Image (cartoon, coloured by chain):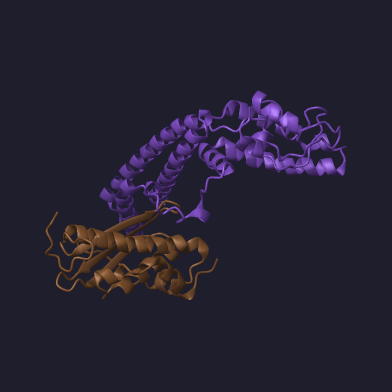
Amino acid sequence: MLNAQESTITTTAPAVCWACLAQLESVLIAQSVSSKGSALFCPHCGKIQPPAGGNYFSIFGLVPRLNLDLGMLERQFHKLSRKLHPDRFARASENEKEWSLAQSSLLNDAYRTLKDPLTRTYYLLKLHGAEIGEEFAGKDRKDPSRVPADLLEEVFELNMQLEEMRMNRKMGEVDEQLQSDLQQAEKKFLALQDEVDEQLHTEWTKWDEGDAQTRETAQKTMMALLDRRRYLSNLVRDVTETLGA
Amino acid sequence: MAYSDKVVDHYNNPRNVGTLDKSAQEVGTGLVGAPECGDVMRLQIRVNPETQVIEEAKFKTFGCGSAIASSSLATEWIKGRKVEEALEIKNTDIVKELSLPPVKIHCSVLAEDAIRAAIGDWKKKNGVAETAPAATAAAQ
């Protein structure tokens, strides 16, 4: 059975196939259980469908989950890419040609987003109404769990060291101690990043299998973890850039 | 998005950049961060124990132009004020002064938080509860 949230996501596609007039809606509901068939094509006559308000998961015929079967995702991606190949639409109507191009680019976006564990988490939480991203920055200031306070001191220190390193470089000086400190820091923050990813995995399962209340709790935890993760990946990026410059 | 002239001015000529001795009794340190953009801001104050006036304020911010301008402006505003008066500064005052666009409002929030954190640290160090007039209140 679908819960209320999922049905609002999956039923925005057109109700019938333009070519054979088969009901698409019922198919969409069935597919979220059976994990078969893509929303890009009519499951009855196999004709391409115009881009509709579905989501990245329904494109692949996958149930929206955080623990995603990546093998399945990749196979579906290759299969659908072949089916959308322009050669296959050489003798199709203008509409179908246009749709196949639009669906192709949608398919690529969807694959990129779902393949990466972080962008997938962002995407699915946003789909469920989570307020993530720069546009919501500062709104949640009453919730202190969103600021990784234990990291602040280190983040600040590291930024100071990075600045010193860049200054040294400008002056043509090399401080080997500083360089090795930064390499240590890079290692440490990479390890912390792995730690966060592991914790995210645990929350994924809670979210995938939980009821509405469990999901809400898991979502809060994930949002805090994603904040921490962003801090860490920015740091790693800066350190790597400075060391490699 | 273009920065306002005032932001550009603070960014190019930041006021009061620097460090105060964190371990000094009369120095309060506030370290805050915005997870959304990864900015970190440190604001420090040196308070005269007799008059409760903030005689010196320093900041160091790693972040965007608006974050740097917000903290630079914050140090300018709190210098010469009494601690309790400095607490009256609101992030909306900073937004107005710097004409910050909606997406940069969190930078001003960060600056307000930094002031509060620095004053909070100073109060804790000196055993000042709420609006106690002098630093002679019983230490916790």
Taking the view exactly as shown, the residue that stands out farthest to the top is: A34
B67 shown above or below A206: below
Q: Chain A is drawn in which colour?
A: purple
Measured from the top left, where is residue A62 in percent x and y?
A: 64, 30
| Residue beneath the point at 45% across and 39% down | A222
Quadrant including the N terminus of chain A: top right
A13 shown above or below A63: below
Residue A81 image-quadrant placement:
top right
B43 shown above or below A11: below
* Chain brown in the figure, letter: B
Measured from the top left, where is residue A89 in percent x and y?
A: 83, 37
| Residue beneath the point at 36% across and 42% down | A189
A217 shown above or below A155: above
Residue B23 in view in this figure: no
Residue A226 in view in this figure: yes
Q: Give A222 or A210, whichever is nearer the viewer.
A: A210
Measured from the top left, where is residue A17 in percent x and y?
A: 82, 35
Measured from the top left, where is residue B52 in percent x and y?
A: 20, 71
Q: Give B101 or A70, whichever is nearer the viewer.
A: B101
